Each structure stands twice: as C-alpha cells, then as structure tokens.
Amino acid sequence: MIKITKPGLLTSVQDFGRYGYQKYGVIASGVMDSTAHRIANLLVGNDENEATLELTLLGPDMEFSEDTLISICGGNLSPSINGKRVKLWRSVLVKAGSKLKFGGCKTGCRAYLAVAGGFVLPEIMDSKSTYIRAGIGGFNGKPLQADDELTLGEPSEFAAQITEVLAAELDGQKFAEMQWTIASDFTSTAVSKPKVRVMKGRQYDWFTQDSQMKLFTESFDVTSQSDRMGYRLKGPELQLEKEQEMLSEAVNFGTIQVPSEGNPIVLLADRQTTGGYPKIGQIATVDLPIMAQLKPGDKVQFTEVSHEVAQQLYLDREKQIHQLKQGISLKIKQESK
Amino acid sequence: MLKIQEIRELIKLIDKSSINEFKYENDGSKIVLKKNAGTAVSYQTEEVPVQPVVNQAPPARESAPAAEPVKASPEVQQETKASEEDSSLHKVVSPMVGTFYAASSPEDDPFVKPGDQVSKDSVVCIIEAMKLFNEIESEVNGEIVKVLVENGQLVEYGQPLFLVKAE
C-alpha cells in the first residue's frame, strides 16, 4: 500500500483515457505525456495502459508500507527516497517503510509514477483515469489528497524478475536503482523552447497568409491559463481572412484552435469533446509529450509537417518503443540468470 | 617497471641536463633515452639565414630546443605505451555490442576526460543497445589516462574503452 502524506499540486490517477464515450459528452482524459507513462509501466513489468500517478510541478510525499517496484519517468521533479536522490527513467525497488518525496521542478512539468501491479481501482467506462471536473474515475474521482491510501495490484511475473535483480543490489539500503536506463530518444521531451511539429488544421485556409506564416515562424508563450484541458498561448495574433462561423465539430489531443481574439489554444488530455473555433493546426502525435512537458512561462515554436510525415514519425516511434520493450525483456533475462 | 609519468619526468630532467644518453635496466625491462643533438644543430643552422629576413631571432632560438623533447618523447612514449597498456593500466571494456556515448545526452559534458580522477563506481560512459542506456563504471579507483573510442562509435563485446591508471 502507498499512503499519500502530502498531495502535491495536482496528483491524479491516469491511464490512456476513456475512449468510446465522447459521443455522450464524456471527455477522454488520460495521461498528458503518454511516452513517459508507457515507459514507466514497462520498467515495472506492467501493461502499458496500467494506471500511473501523474504528478504536476510540485510532487506529493508518500510512504510505502510494503516492498514496491516503482519507476518515475517524465519531467524531473527532484524525487528522493529518505533524503537520497532517486534517478528518473529506471526500475527502482523501494523497501517497506521508505518515504518518497519530491522537491522542485527542474525540467519539464509532469512526472509519472508507476508501481508494479498498478493500483487496485474500479474501471469506470473502461478506464481508471480521473475526470476531475465530473468527479469520475481515479481515486474517488478526485486528485489525491493527504491520507489517501492506494492499494497495489499483483505484480506480473516479469516484475518479480526485475525485483529479484534489484533485491540483489539492495545491500541494506532503502532502495536500489537499475544500472541501465532509457535511451535519450525517449527521455529528451523536457527541452527548453522546443520545436513542435504541426500539420495544417481543417480551417488553415481560413486564416490570412500573414497568420499562416507567423504560426510556423514565430514563437509562442505558454500562459498561466493552461491546464490539462488546454494551453492558452500568447504570441502573434492569428486572424481570419474574413469573419465566419462554423458548427462545432470533433477536436483531438493536440488540436490548435483559434478564438476570435487571435490567441491560439492547444487542446490536451482533458479537452472538451467538440469545438467551434477554427482549427489552424494539429500537433503531430509524436510531439504531444513535448507539449505536455511545457509549463506556464515556457516558449514553443511550431514547424510544419505533412500528414504523411507525421504518420511516418508515429510508426517509427512505435517501432522504437517495440524495440525498447524487447531490450528491457532481454536485459532482465540476461541479468536474472 | 617505470610508470609512464616517471618516464615523462625523466625525459624532462634529461632534456634540461647535459646528459646525451640515458640507459635504465631493471627486471628485464630496458629503457634507452637519447638526445638527437645532431639534427637539432642542423635545424638551427638552417634557420639562421631566414632570421634576418623575418627578424624573429629570439623565438626561433627558443623553439629549437623545445622541439627536441617533442621529437624525443613520442618515440619513448610509444615504446612504453605498448607495454604499459598490457600491464599496469586498467582497461575498461565494453560488456556488450552497442553504441558508445561519452555523455548522457548531446548537450551534457562527457562523464570523464583524460586526467580525471575516478572512483570504482564512477560512471565513465554509456553503451546503448536496444534503446537502453547501459552505464559503464570504471571498476577501479584511479585516473583516466586515455579514451580509446569516439563518441557514437559502435563497439564490440570486450573492446577496451578507457585506460585507467589504478591507484
């Protein structure tokens, strides 16, 4: 069991999200940075979709009442166990009675804490994700509070093997970290002033040539009106050629919509199900984790990419993750001999 | 057997002295250091006619003696290095086939460079295989003498990566 002693700024249970219910107005929710979430799960022998804790800017404090295999991936929120720094992107075996704390946010915005076996929580509409505004899913439909106690599921056989490898390294310490970590192809999402690849949106042609050009040449600031639902950006004003209205239509994770005042909004995990503002762009799926790790005050630049290239990038990324999965499995096989 | 540092020290001392030839024998190993006075002299005489034109007599004179140890040391170093590599220096070898990285990311400084002190659990490099970064430790306390591979190079199982002078 894990007991939350301090909740942090915003700590919620998330998996890949609640799909198939947007037609009823139920938003998808789910993790903001899916790469960090998936890898955190892989490092503790979980299914990629198992729920993790999404920690935001200021992480929580917690206590472990049993020996637990964990991993922390994504932004660097300065995690430490009993005062000793813990490395990110690694399998870590934590002894019962240890205290995990987070300090300042050094890079990125969000970290994902996975535990072997996941959390024992009901699936509501096929997902454990917390839909905070509606009070659905996760732990009682809310972000975690002090004194919440999370029950851990049964670790997989693979998790048991990882635990065995790490147990041999414990040497009386409160925790043991794996000697190997994840290649920087996956871990370098928390970068300053990143270039994020964007496809033209459905109403791209509605915008003035000047606005179209500025979208891909100038940089935008992430304003403080940014959360899991979307990031409001501030930069050059993006204007329509002529004023026109549209019927609401589907929006997606990474859709860039522009209200009439001209400042774009990037829709994210907790986006509404439909939108009525013209969509100037759509962020390529592979670059969504980069977007998710931006925090208010950060800058971002967009570069244009075609639909075909964005798809190819996505396929390449999936191939790399597949390779990583095999790599982890081979590594554990080799080390547990 | 003399350590490479000791040999360097000897070269410096002999160079400053009036000794032209130095022999050292111990336990079957033998070192002979010779000053190549002949060529040095001929260098100086060749450069003399140039001097009036360029008018840089003092630097030219200074550079001539300086050239001597530079000429002498590589010969000695190469001889000794071959034997040192096999004996006293610890080799950090690659435990797997993969790509060698001197730093944890392109923006970061390398973990170590020649002359750095390392302890046996210091991470000296990363070998990437199957999208995993494997941290390689020095395994001995000592000083990094040489990096034997280049950043991004593919390395084989058992290939030496670093030479470390163990304490």
Image (cartoon, coloured by chain):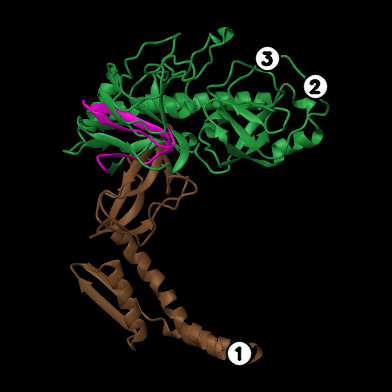
Chain colours: A green, B brown
| Residue A315 spot, x, y in % from top left | 56, 23
Q: Which numbered tag is attached to residue A244?
A: 2
B100 horizontally vs A119: left or right: right
**Which residue type carries mark 3?**
Glu
Q: What's the chain of the residue with tag 2?
A: A
**Which residue type carries mark 1?**
Gln
A56 horizontally vs A316: left or right: left
Q: Decide whether residue A57 is among the magenta residues.
A: yes
Of residues A193 and B119, which is closer to you in this image? A193
Residue B31 in view here: yes
| Residue B93 spot, x, y in % from top left | 32, 46
Task: Give the residue at mark 1.
Answer: B51
Task: Give the residue at mark 3.
Answer: A249
Q: Are circles 2 and 1 on residues that touch, CB within 8 Å?
A: no
Q: What's the chain of the residue with tag 1?
A: B
Q: Decide whether residue A111 is among the magenta residues.
A: no
Q: CA distance from mark 3 to mark 2?
A: 15 Å
Of residues A8 and A16, which is closer to you in this image? A8
Q: Which residues are magenta?
A: A56-83
From the viewer's perspective, is the residue at label 1 or at label 3 nearer?
3
**Which residue type carries mark 2?**
Gln
Quarter of the image that includes the N terminus of chain B: bottom left
From the viewer's perspective, is the residue at label 3 or at label 2 nearer?
2
Query: Does dot 3 land on a helix, a strand or a loop?
Result: strand
Residue A44, by quadrant, is: top left
Mark 3 closeness class: few <14, some 14–19, many ≥20 residues within 10 Å: few
Q: Earlier in the sequence, mark 3 or mark 2?
A: 2
Q: Which numbered tag is attached to residue B20?
A: none
Query: Does dot 1 land on a helix, a strand or a loop?
Result: helix
Residue A136, by quadrant, is: top left
Q: CA distance from mark 1 to mark 3?
A: 85 Å
